[in-house]
Amino acid sequence: RRRELLCGAAVVLVCALLVTLKVTCSRAKDVTMAAKAPVNFFSSRSPVFDLFRGQLDYADHIRQDSEVVLYFFYAPWCGQSIAAREEIEQVSRRLADQVLFVAINCWWNQGKCRKQKHFFYFPVIYLYHRSFGPIEYKGPMSAVYIEKFVRRVMTPLHYISSRSKLLDFLSDYEPGVLGYFEFNASPQPPGYMTFFTSALYSLKKDYLGTIRFGVITDKQIAKEISLTRSGSVYLHRHVNTSLIYPSEVMNYTAENICKWALENRETLIRWLRPHGGKSLLLNNELKKGPAFFLFIPFNPLAESHPLLDEITKVALEYNNCNKSQAAEPVPQHLRDLNPPAIESIVAHAHTQLADAYSITKYPCCNTVLLPQWHSISRTHNVCELCVNQTLGVKPSKVNVPQCNFLEIEAALDSFYLKERTFFQFVSNTIECSNFLSFYSPFSYYSACCRKVNRGLINLISSEKTILQTPNVAFSSHGKEDKDDTQHSIPHIEERNCFTPDLHVNGTNITGLSCRTNKTLNLYLLDSNLFWMYAERLGASRSNHLKEFATIVDLKEETHYILDQNQTLTKSTIENFIQNFSILYSPLKRHLVGDSSVHFHAQHVITEVTTNTFHDVVFLNEKDVLLLYYAQWCGFCASLNHIFIQLARLLPPNNFTVARIDVTRNDLPWEFMTDRLPTILFFPYKRKDKSVKFPEDFSVTLPNLLKFILHYSRLPSAALDSEPCTKECPQRERKLQEEHISHLKSEIQKLRSEVSALHQAQDQLKAQLSEARREEHKLQQQKLTLEKQHSILQLHSEQLQALYEQKNRELEEMAEKLQELADASENLLTENALLKVLVASIKGKLENKDETKKSIQSDEILPNHNTGPVLTAIDGLHERERLDISNIDSTVTEHKENRTE
Amino acid sequence: MRHPASRKRAWPRGRGGSRKCRCGRDGRLPLPRPRHAPLLLPAGLPVGPAPAGRRGGGGGPRDRLRPLPGARARHVLPRVRELPAPRLPAGRAAAAHVRRAGHLGQILGNVSEFQRVVNVLQEGVDFNIDVNASVFETNIRVVGGLLSAHLLSKKAGVEVEAGWPCSGPLLRMAEEAARKLLPAFQTPTGMPYGTVNLLHGVNPGETPVTCTAGIGTFIVEFATLSHLTGDPVFENVARKALKALWKNRSDIGLVGNHIDVVTAKWVAQDAGIGAGVDSYFEYLVKGAVLLHDEELMSMFLDYNKAISNYTKFEDWYLWVQMYKGTVSMPVFQSLEAYWPGLQSLIGDINNAMRTFLNYYTVWKQFGGLPEFYNIPQGYTVEKREGYPLRPELIESAMYLYRATRDPTLLELGRDAVESIEKTSKVDCGFATIKDLRDHRLDNRMESFFLAETVKYLYLLFDPDNFIHNNGSSFDVVPMPYGECILGAGGYVFNTEAHPIDPAALHCCRKQKEEQWEVQDLMREFHFLKRKRKSTFTRTAAHSRGGSQAGSADTTTESSGKGRNPEKITKRRVPLLSCPTQPFTSRLAVLGQVFLDNT
């Protein structure tokens, strides 16, 4: 019973096991694992409130308590979110007391956020100002920029409390919108909220926040921008006339104000902030015409940006086309002058007077008339000589002596030392160049020279006299004394202001944008974020200042850069722009080269760069084969080995095999190609007659060799026609020596090959002998095996014989047995006969008994008779027994035999 | 890559025609990881300034590409499903995968693992087994892998035999495997069947429908085999198949998805660049690069024209009807992401970047690329929302980074590393993402994750890897007919990311042919002066010949030229060349793109 129970249990268990196995196996096919449960994204110590389960409803709930809230929507797997996390934390640490930072996991599919929002990218930053929002932040994911934006949302309106603040506000390069609201009437004047909202609205529209909103509450200050009615809105513009919001025509709504400001603002200079995603920003901007890119390190949180202010001034001047409206520097002067002056200037903002006060912003300049060789000539070379202070020494803000007398003198002296060079420039072009002053490392001067009509100069000077500016003619010291030709002494005019003059001869940048047909668009880029572009345009990596100026002309496919050794100042920028604008620009196309060239490890192929191109190709006293390639081009890379082989074959004394990576190295136009790979050959002594490897030939070693042979041979052919000079045998000897060395190297190679072959031969021999040994061994083995085989055969024969013998014996035995059987059969028959006999005898005896009974007398006789019969029978029996035992013994004998 | 696609499954059903394509990655098999031997990571990580930064998350992505600790190595994979009707010879395929892992070791610097695997392989691999194998998969994985391993074996420190690279045990194995595939090519059109029995050849009753990629993805491996072994049969069948496809393109120049290899009738007429077709285009370009073959390149350029005419919309590539050019599916497939990489090889970098940035937005949306992405709807397609950690996008990023050094590409690499690690890492490997919408994981890890995704990721972050060699270093191998220059860069990856050295092909065939000619020419260099007169007259004759465009003299000069003289005179732009980059290319970084010259 128990056994049965156990068996049953076992069967059930096995079944259960099988079922579970099957279940698990079949499940294993479709087993999926849910995504990991979300965990904290921000550390618990961070001031950021991390809703990693995406509780958007809760976020909206806690938003009510705070004036300004920042939502940071992230996905935990997203690299950008992870990168931005630190920046957000940094901002939150600074603003935690004023702004609520909420991070929401908007990826987890159980979360509320994922169910309600649908983002195409992460992270997304939303800002709320009370009920207004969301304002999406689209700027760079950098802490300073985010903080600046958050601060803007916190205070969308600047409060303009004083005149100086007004001036500050107006002088900024970014367009500004001002609203005037009287707060005395009611707690909140009508329209103020709309104005406030429009400020927030503008942030929503334009994440760069390039329109600033200010509010004026003081009547006096409002008057200065001619606002009198509370609720009026004013858009300040520098070049064009400023506007007042036409509330009669357009509804007074936040959207409209914002739209109006966006449409009417003037952008003299634009920030470019590519967002990193696919965009056509640069494409669109560059297609507008030549662009002036200024890379400056920019901290949006900084209070003041001196460099930016200077650049703004340049931009204003550049775009200041209409002289009569040249009110622009206004605020600037206001700052320098005393208050009474402000009144007047502001009042007559559009008067010429401004010019008279715009002194400080110009460096001190001199017009220099260069001595004329032909005094009869009606033309003069005129140079503008300007002294610029760059570092440290700032132009004095005092009005009267703008130029340090000594400085001018020093500059003049050094200028004369170089004046000879300027005589060459007798052309109609204006050439500007900057020189470092000998005397002061901090200042240098620039000179712009051109040929002008003598009459014109007179006109200018007369103009100047009218303009009450003292014309002081210097007689140049030292220089002049040596010069006997009194009349050709440079005529030097010292002026406070060269604006009017420049306006005539066109060397000033004021309003240049309208006078040239190469109008520049000015752009600013933050070099902390976009230095990559600067590097691509040739800024050196070592430049720690990260300031860089370049003019990119997409149509001409060229760009020019401002020498990086010069610091970016107003005057250098102005010079740069001027040089670009004039007809025959002295600017040279900048060629970007790869400075970090690592030379070929084995030095077989010379790597050429922009800088070494001339040296390697032209100054080299060899035939040069130059390959133009690019690393990414599949067809170039698969030719590498052919060129390496070629370089190893050609005698290095006569040939240079070089290559240039044209994606990283620009070359002058005449050396550029439009397809890669391209092979050019520059034969020695006729480098100007470079030849291109024909494109319809496949680039193979024999073809290249033929090409080189063909073109390098021409000079020798030319020489051939000349009578053989002494050099001839020398050259030939040289050549032969080279050949010999080549042959020697060939022989060397062959030798090494021979030795290699020898080695191989030895190896083979060894292998062969080993094989032979093995064969021998095998044969021996074979022999022994054969022997063994024959022995075995013998053995088997013997066994066979033995077997047969045994067989025979067996047969004999069988015969004997047969005989015995026969004999026993005979005996049995005999026995039967005997039995019959006995029976018959018994019968007879019975008969006799009966007769005996009948005849008593006959008794003695039969008794006699039976005696011998019985004995005979007994004897028979005995014999039988013997026989049987006999057979038994033989059988056992047989058995014994077999077992044996 | 161009895995002609998770194909039959990746394709929506009920669109008419047979979707049976065997080029699929169906036979997924476990593969061992490189062991814990430390990777020889190059010091320093010159990844350039990535502005948005790789700040958080300690350690660059490269650090995280280390293999799992050895103890786990064994358990890494076996979670893979049992093979559905294995098309690959199980044992062999496993061997191939083994070697693939070995490759990974070689590129990642784990040399000892490579050597170990090579030894394992040499001990008895037998292709004489009665198994049905996918011709496509066997070619790219087994043949390609063996060839690549053969060519890399010296670099990996394996003792090579005397005739290397033109002979060797791995090469013989590759040849043996390739011979098993040859019966599939015996069709009236020359286009191969999709499946072949390794022992008996093509099974009677085998379906004649093969996907386009399954026909056109042989030239790289087969031409390499022919060049190395000297037996032209492989290259010939591969070329014949390519030409057959070319002949059967539609009037507007497009090819469909599946074709009947006996009757040459198109069964699936969707034309695009993704699943089912992908590696056909890839191999046209790579074949042209590897063999310097103008014919292949001219085919590709014609296709390229048709593709951009009919399928390209705003830098996306859609699916169209191959005869009419009407849009049939406005989807982006994850497999299509190889295209920008291919474009960068032939110098179309501007377009490549524009397309790449489109694809990157999809990645940003999901943290991976769904198999199908509906472009107008901006969301995944029903039942196609998985991401099996495919390599294509990262592969393109690697090629493009070579060309542009754009930090955006490294950012993609960073995002990929973060995303894969955050979402798909499980105890014993990296699981396929079953559904990108919620990042549910499937119980499997695809073989191409290790073979390709990890390899390309590593190469993206290691610009100094020998694979990126631009010819600044090389190996000299003495051969009986002169020295061979090997390893000089320009490696061509087959579609399973096995690199092939074009110099080896040249070494084993061309160099032998050119040897004497070169020697004669070299002699002339030195007799320049002595025999000046005679040489001059000869060169004069030569130049005369050169001036008479296409004269007998010049045609005999170059074997490549004599083929088609009329064509050459017509042609202006040499086919086997890339355009130099326009001026705007220097500013086309950090997401900026430029429209073509207007």
Image (cartoon, coloured by chain):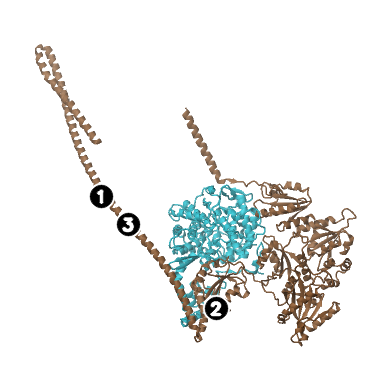
Chain colours: A brown, B cyan
- Res. B42 in view: yes
Q: Read off the chain for label 2.
A: A
Instruction: State the image coordinates of residue A594 (x, y, percent, origin top left).
Output: 62, 68
Disc 2 residue crowd, few under 14, some 14–19, many 20+, Cα 10 Å:
many
Q: Which residue is labeled 2 in the image?
A: A684
| Res A790 label | 1
Left or right of A201? Residue A643 is: left
Discs 1 and 3 carry the same chain letter: yes
Q: CA distance from mark 2 to mark 3?
A: 66 Å
Instruction: State the image coordinates of residue A117 (x, y, percent, origin top left).
Output: 70, 51
Disc 1 residue crowd, few under 14, some 14–19, many 20+, Cα 10 Å:
few
Check disc 3 and report its element: helix, strand or loop: helix
Please name the amino acid that badge 3 sits on. Glu
Q: CA distance from mark 2 to mark 1?
A: 87 Å
Using the image as rendered, state which of residue A54 and residue A218 is in the foreground.
Answer: A218
Q: Read off the chain for label 3.
A: A
Left or right of A121? Residue A684 is: left
| Res A775 label | 3
Please name the amino acid that badge 1 sits on. Ser
